[in-house]
């Protein structure tokens, strides 16, 4: 707003005055301009603006990142604004006098993210007209290579209209390259919001800046549209001879200038001769550390099998393709960011629960923490069928224990005794310590199979908190939901 010379003069003046003089100057400036109008700084007329709510539904953090971008822009335009996950939102709690902006991704087969399922159910059960008076905008995040593109956003839009809410701009459905189109949408949404309430603004004043916490990487190497090439450096089956499973540790070397962080996944592009017309990439959690394993990405891939109708063994398309790769083979991939599964700050304790291939991101976490010399303690829960043939990365965990990079490990091998033992049983046995770690600020991570593992673990956590903290089942469920909402219980389940 100030020209260069004015800016310089102001800096000189402020550099030479005392604190008391600054306070006097503030009063003097206020006297010069009369009543302070919060909108002056944004250039918007002083029409009273309704508060705005930005609701997001996310699985891997993209929608949350975009909602923070949106929040900044709306705030800069002079609105009071809040963002909130829809995880605990009820239709009755949506105030029709607010402006509502929904940013919703789609997962599974056209479904809302898991944490948003109760809200979608509540929407479905709400009565026609229940949200009349509400003005809203919807953005969907999705991937057009899936059969039902942005299904959750489309469904949300329909339900909101049925409930009597009015869209103040057409819903926008983003494909995988959303990051490059998001700034224009944010800008447009601020303009539409201003138009709705009769205020004016220019685009320059609302241009959003990306959130520091949520760096969205776009372009080559970050979506299936622009994959990069790598070479297989090493591939080995981690299971031993007696195992019923095959889990491949795969090291990919690459020269491209791409960046990943712990918790991210890799999207594998199937070669056309392998994909049987199925062009949807498959995701695999990254099990290497960007600091420790420079220019390499490691994956931990279980060969998926099933019985065909004729009794023969069938295989999953992508895991079969990966399992068949050899050293020197070329592979096409991209980094799929997961901003909902970031490694905690170095001084925080972490509890990692990752049976089967759920172990992958935790291998990445531990190497990263050892490289950084992180002071936080690390506790791992791992499980599989048999200790002697299914203990993935056994020698590495033993070394990490010896060097005190790993502080605690609890193992559940389900078929090594007459009754089945799973990671949630080990959690229950260690309930007191788990609660003590959590009360001390530890962050919980869960990775691996969504069904039934992740559900059983979450239920066990509720039971543990109920028992250890003498809470009712409902209070304990709330406690776990609070942990989730505050990024203290992070899940990457599939
Ligand atoms: C965020 C994320 C992270 C992931 N991380 C990992 C990881 O670290 N490691 C890992 O191993 N996996 C991981 N996965 C799972 C992975 O993406 C794939 O889903 C998995 O490898 C199966 O893919 P596929 O192409 O081999 O099987 P697909 O061909 O997609 O088949 C899917 C399943 O159906 C079965 N099937 C196929 N055809 C039939 C049929 N005719 N009858 C009966 N059953 C059939 C297959 O055996 C397989 O079990 C992750 C998934 C997500 C979303
Ligand atoms: C396992 C999986 C399933 C998905 N299914 C769909 C789908 O059915 N339809 C769609 O449009 N997008 C689908 N997507 C793409 C996501 O919606 C997209 O990656 C989005 O940017 C994720 O946003 P989020 O991080 O906020 O969850 C799927 C992604 C994954 C990983």
Image (cartoon, rainbow, N blue to C red):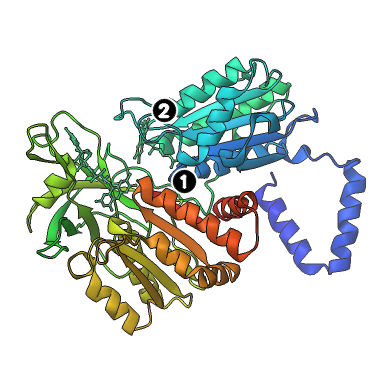
User: Is ligand 2 within 8 Å of the beta carbon of the residue shown at mark 1?
Assistant: yes
Q: Name the disc covering residue 283, or none.
A: none
- Please name the residue shown 59% across and 62% down the image: 467
Q: For residue 352, what is the image quadrant? A: bottom left
Q: For residue 143, what is the image quadrant? A: top left
Q: Name the disc covering residue 150, or none.
A: 2
Q: Residues within 10 Å of mark 2 (few under 14, many from 20)?
A: many
Report whether 481 appears left or right of 309.
Answer: right
Q: Is residue 395 above or below residue 219?
A: below
Report whether 347 appears left or right of 304.
Answer: right
Expressed as whole percent of the image width and height from the top left, the position of residue 231 reads 13, 55
Number of callouts: 2
Q: Name the disc covering residue 61, or none.
A: 1
User: Is ligand 2 within 8 Å of the beta carbon of the residue shown at mark 2?
Assistant: yes
Q: Is residue 374 above or below residue 330?
A: below
Q: Secondary structure at mark 2?
A: loop
Quadrant observed for ligand 1 in the rendered image: top left
Expressed as whole percent of the image width and height from the top left, the position of residue 236 reads 12, 62
Report whether 320 appears left or right of 137.
Answer: left
Disc 2 to disc 1, C-alpha distance: 16 Å
- Please name the residue shown 57% across and 54% down the image: 480
Work out whether residue 426 or residue 42 is closer to the camera in this orientation and state it.
Answer: 426
Q: Residues within 10 Å of mark 1 (few under 14, many from 20)?
A: some
Expressed as whole percent of the image width and height from the top left, the position of residue 111 reads 42, 31
Q: Is residue 488 above or below residue 209?
A: below
Q: Is residue 184 above or below residue 469?
A: above
- Would residue 488 be visible to someone looking at this image? no
Q: Secondary structure at mark 1?
A: loop
């Amino acid at each position: 707003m100030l020209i260069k010379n004015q800016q310089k003069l102001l800096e000189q003046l402020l550099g030479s005055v005392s604190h008391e003089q600054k306070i006097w100057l503030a009063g003097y400036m206020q006297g010069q301009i009369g009543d302070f109008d919060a909108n002056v700084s944004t250039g918007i007329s002083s029409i009273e603006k309704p508060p705005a709510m930005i609701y997001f539904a996310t699985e891997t953090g993209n929608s949350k990142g975009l909602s923070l971008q949106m929040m900044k822009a709306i705030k800069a335009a002079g609105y009071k604004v809040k963002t909130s996950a829809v995880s605990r939102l009820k239709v009755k709690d949506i105030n029709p006098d607010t402006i509502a902006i929904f940013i919703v991704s789609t997962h599974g087969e056209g479904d809302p993210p898991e944490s948003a399922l109760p809200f979608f159910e509540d929407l479905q059960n709400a009565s026609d007209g229940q949200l009349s008076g509400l003005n809203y905008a919807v953005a969907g995040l999705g991937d057009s290579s899936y059969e039902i593109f942005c299904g959750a956003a489309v469904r949300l839009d329909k339900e909101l209209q049925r409930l009597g809410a009015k869209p103040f701009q057409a819903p926008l459905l983003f494909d995988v390259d959303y990051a490059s189109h998001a700034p224009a949408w944010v800008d447009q949404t601020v303009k539409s919001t201003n138009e709705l309430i009769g205020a004016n603004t220019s685009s320059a004043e609302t241009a959003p800046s990306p959130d520091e916490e949520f760096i969205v990487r776009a372009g080559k190497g970050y979506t299936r549209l622009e994959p990069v090439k790598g070479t297989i450096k090493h591939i080995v089956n981690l299971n031993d001879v007696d195992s019923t499973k095959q889990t491949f540790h795969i090291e990919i070397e690459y020269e491209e200038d791409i960046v990943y962080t712990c918790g991210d996944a890799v999207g594998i592009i199937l070669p056309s001769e392998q994909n049987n017309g199925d062009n949807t990439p498959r995701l695999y959690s990254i099990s290497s550390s960007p600091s420790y394993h420079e220019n390499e990405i490691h994956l931990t891939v279980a060969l998926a099998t099933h019985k065909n109708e004729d009794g023969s063994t069938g295989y999953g398309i992508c895991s079969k393709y990966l399992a068949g790769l050899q050293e020197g083979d070329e592979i096409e991939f991209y980094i799929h960011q997961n901003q909902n599964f970031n490694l905690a700050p170095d001084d925080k304790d972490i509890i990692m629960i990752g049976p089967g291939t759920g172990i992958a991101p935790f291998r990445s976490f531990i190497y990263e923490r050892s490289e950084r010399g992180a002071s936080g303690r690390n506790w791992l829960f791992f499980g599989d069928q048999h200790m002697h043939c299914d203990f993935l990365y056994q020698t590495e965990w033993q070394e990490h224990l010896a060097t005190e990079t790993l502080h605690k490990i609890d193992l559940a091998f389900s078929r090594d005794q007459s009754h089945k033992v799973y990671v949630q049983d080990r959690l229950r046995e260690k309930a007191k310590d788990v609660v003590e770690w959590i009360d001390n600020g530890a962050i919980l991570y869960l990775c691996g199979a969504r069904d039934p593992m992740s559900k059983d673990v979450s239920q066990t956590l509720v039971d543990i908190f109920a028992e250890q903290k003498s809470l009712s089942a409902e209070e304990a469920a709330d406690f776990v939901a609070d942990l989730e909402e505050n990024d203290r219980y992070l899940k990457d389940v599939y």
